[in-house]
């Protein structure tokens, strides 16, 4: 067989192994691995001295999302271009059901936002804001359309927050349809009281965003989410986990054998509460929920990543400019009131760079890097083995690193449509030289070379239920069995 492209002399890292190999690509797929693969008729890319990993999968992005009185700075065009430049070859973005709307209507809106506007492959989770009993079957239709995961919120009362009954209804339905619930776990009621109290006392600066969202509010909600999933007998995935105390809840659930999973994000590993205290309202750049935690917390999260108490690093990319730009109010609209600062920060382009730095500094093995940025996200969200590994038959989604070249993160060079970078000036020992999405080179010699029409919709299957559901059933406290089969 003749190949289209052969990457020669690479050092390949997967979640399981590191080995020397050529990688042969035919069309959109990896066709063969091995040494001395035939190159006749093929384009050859010599990767001597370079390192290859599977394309990153970012399962938590918000592109073109109306939120907090404005709309995110990045749409699918700029967001996925930035993703590609940062080595992310697939994203899962969040489609939103408006209150009173059918789930599928919200999904159609997001299809229109993304179609023919994406440089990388994309799928969706469905945000549920309204789920009375007579609507639960709408979840099944969404799963049938390849959107096999749902986000519910225990925070943002009056906007996204669901009560426990709604959450429990959704969890129970995933037992029928094979979907998975992704939970924003913060106690929204408590936080709202604390916000009102702070504002009444004239405490308006950005740091009060963090001080009104205590770790315990996250740990309590995480505990409750895990308990609700246990009672429903289904797996659950906690999104953007920030607090070490919340992680302990996940750890305890997993030690009891429950199929509980959690992601953290680079901001919780590389930034801290102290950033909110920067002068001139700079702290607003870091306003996100859950908030950054005090220094020292990040060490607990690194330990959790290395011990599989946390399984994924995603970005929660939700970019807002600092300054108001055109019709999109920026972070500065909260100058007099921290609760009006739009929640979210950019990161779609910097996730792999920051974690690669962590690998070079010995905080993470390179194989664990692959596992938490690509393989496990693919497995949990119905994309494996098409994506998430380097093997014959998999999509040729690859990132080629040059370990000899440094990359300094900066607003001056990033591709995100946002006027600051939370990691400004951080230097990474290594740089992304080539990125392939389904066999097509979208980054060549460190420069974007793709198109924003190449990305296709990823229709995802329901989770592979057998293993996870039997874990849920066997770890569940048994007296529930009579009412919930
Ligand atoms: O601050 C955040 N995280 N903004 C995005 C919305 C969310 O809760 O994920
Ligand atoms: Zn959230
Ligand atoms: Zn989010």
Image (cartoon, rainbow, N blue to C red):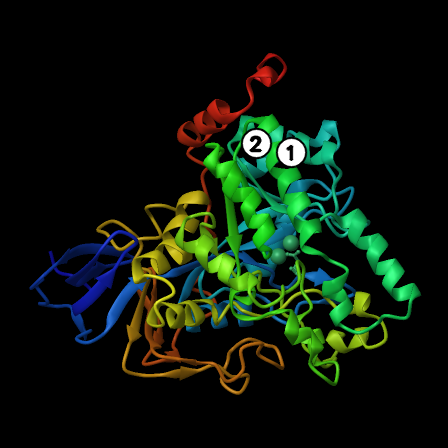
Q: Quadrant of ligand 1?
A: bottom right
Can residue 248 be seen in the rendering of this structure? yes
Crowd band around label 1 with a 10 angstrom C-alpha radius: few (<14), some (14–19), many (20+): many
The image shows residue 36, relative to residue 262, as above or below, that is below
Residues 208 and 3: in front is: 208
The image shows residue 209, relative to residue 106, as above or below, that is below
For label 1, the SS is helix
Q: Quadrant of the N terminus?
A: bottom left
At 51% from the left and 84% from the top, the residue drawn is 410
Residues 349 and 196: in front is: 196
Place residue 242 in its image quadrant.
bottom right
Q: Which mark is residue 174?
A: 2
List x then y, in percent, for residue 20.
15, 63
For label 2, the SS is helix
Can residue 5 be seen in the rendering of this structure? no
List x then y, in percent, for residue 171.
61, 32
């Amino acid at each position: 067989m003749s190949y289209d492209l052969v990457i020669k002399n690479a050092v390949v890292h997967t979640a399981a192994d590191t080995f020397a190999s050529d990688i042969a690509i035919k069309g959109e797929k990896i066709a063969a691995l091995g040494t001395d693969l035939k190159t006749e008729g093929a384009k050859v890319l010599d990767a001597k001295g370079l390192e290859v990993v599977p394309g990153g999968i970012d399962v938590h992005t918000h592109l073109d999302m109306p939120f907090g009185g404005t709309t995110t700075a990045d749409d699918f065009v700029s967001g996925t271009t930035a993703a590609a430049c940062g080595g992310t070859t697939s994203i899962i973005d969040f489609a939103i059901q408006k209150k009173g709307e059918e789930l599928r209507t919200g999904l159609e809106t997001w299809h229109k936002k993304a179609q023919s506007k994406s440089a990388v492959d994309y799928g969706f989770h469905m945000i549920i804001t309204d789920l009375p009993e007579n609507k639960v079957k709408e979840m099944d239709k969404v799963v049938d359309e390849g959107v096999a995961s749902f986000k519910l919120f225990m925070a943002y009362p009056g906007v996204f927050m669901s009560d426990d009954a709604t959450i429990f209804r959704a969890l129970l339905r995933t037992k029928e349809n094979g979907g998975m619930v992704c939970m924003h776990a913060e106690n929204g009621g408590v936080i709202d009281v604390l916000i009102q109290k702070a504002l009444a006392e004239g405490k308006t600066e950005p740091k009060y965003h963090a001080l009104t969202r205590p770790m315990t509010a996250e740990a309590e909600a995480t505990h409750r989410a895990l308990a609700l999933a246990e009672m429903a007998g289904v797996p659950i995935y906690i999104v953007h986990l920030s607090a070490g105390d919340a992680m302990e809840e996940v750890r305890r659930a997993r030690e009891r054998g429950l199929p509980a999973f959690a992601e953290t994000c680079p901001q919780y590993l590389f930034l801290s509460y102290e950033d909110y205290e920067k002068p001139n309202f700079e702290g607003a750049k870091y306003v996100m929920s859950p908030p950054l935690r005090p220094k020292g917390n990040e060490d607990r999260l690194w330990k959790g990543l290395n011990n599989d108490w946390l399984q994924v690093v995603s970005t929660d990319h939700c970019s807002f400019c600092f300054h108001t730009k055109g019709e999109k109010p920026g972070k500065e609209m909260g100058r007099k009131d921290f609760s009006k600062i739009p929640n979210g920060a950019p990161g779609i382009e910097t996730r792999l760079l920051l974690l690669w730095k962590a690998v070079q500094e010995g905080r993470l093995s390179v194989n664990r890097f692959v596992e938490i940025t690509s393989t496990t996200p693919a497995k949990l969200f119905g994309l494996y083995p098409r994506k998430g590994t380097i093997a014959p038959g998999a999509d040729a989604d690859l990132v080629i690193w040059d370990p000899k070249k440094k990359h300094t993160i900066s607003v001056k060079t990033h591709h995100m449509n946002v006027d600051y970078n939370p990691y400004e000036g951080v230097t990474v020992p290594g740089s992304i030289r080539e990125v392939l999405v389904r066999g097509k080179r979208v980054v060549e010699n460190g420069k974007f070379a793709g198109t924003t029409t190449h990305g296709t919709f990823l229709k995802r299957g329901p989770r592979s239920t057998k293993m996870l559901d039997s874990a849920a059933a066997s770890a569940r406290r048994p007296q529930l069995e009579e009412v919930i089969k």
